[in-house]
Amino acid sequence: MKERFPLVRFGPQLWTRDLARKIRTDISALLEKLQAGDELAIDAKGVEVFDYSFANELFGKTILSLASEYAGRFVVIEHLTPYAHENLQKALESLGLQMIERRGTALRLLGKVHPADQATFDALRNTKTPTSAATLATVLGVNLTAMNERLTKLTSMGVIRREKAVSPAGRELYEYRLLS
């Protein structure tokens, strides 16, 4: 299921932590209704700009709460202007966070993104199906421990989802996927 949250209803220019806190309450209520695997698309269409403190409060705290309060749900930002994009990028970088940005049909990571995280995200995006850590490690040519560390980091930031599965040999394993 995909739920849309249009930011423009709060105005074309979004400032201050106080406003972001009010909006975050609405976003939290929507996330509460969603199930694991569902997507909340925050639509910035019509929003000209938001400042750093707004981005830090709204997006930073939302991303920080994903793993513990809304596990398996995806938060995606869409239709950012260059000004809003820059402020969100800086806010996420300062917090050491990343999130998914959708441009058209393309998904990419935004924030403090290590090249290894981007490579792992891209490999998962290219598989288009749930994939095991072992398969991803082979595809990217890294050892399994390194791949598990990457996947744990990306899962904790809410940019990928981890699901239990059963291997062909009958063993329990985890598979990873992007939003559908």
Image: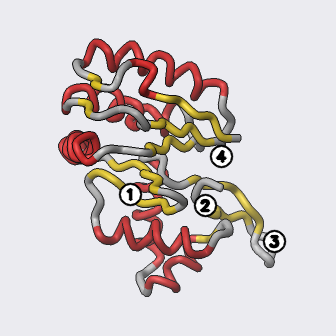
x and y, in percent, of residue 104 in the image: 50, 57
The residue wearing badge 1 is 109
Provide the secondary structure element on which disc 2 rests. strand
In whole angstroms, how far apart are the C-alphas of marks 4 and 1? 18 Å
Quarter of the image with the C terminus is: bottom right
Toward the viewer: 172 or 155? 155
Per the rendering, the mark at residue 177 is: 2
Q: Residue at x 72, y 63 (%)?
A: 172
- Mark 2: which amino acid? Arg
Provide the secondary structure element on which disc 3 rests. loop
Image marks 2 and 3: residues in contact by CB distance under 8 Å: no
Say few, some or many: other residues with alpha carbon within 10 Å of mark 1 (under 14 / 14 to 19 / 20 or more).
some
The residue wearing badge 3 is 170
x and y, in percent, of residue 119 in the image: 40, 73
In whole angstroms, how far apart are the C-alphas of marks 1 and 3? 34 Å
Q: Which of the two discs, 4 and 3, labels the residue nearer the N terminus?
A: 4
- Mark 3: which amino acid? Gly
Q: Which of the two discs, 4 and 1, labels the residue nearer the N terminus?
A: 4
Image marks 2 and 4: residues in contact by CB distance under 8 Å: no
In whole angstroms, how far apart are the C-alphas of marks 2 and 3? 20 Å
x and y, in percent, of residue 25 in the image: 46, 16
Provide the secondary structure element on which disc 4 rests. loop
Provide the secondary structure element on which disc 1 rests. strand
Q: Image quarter for residue 15?
A: top left
Q: Image quarter for residue 132?
A: bottom right
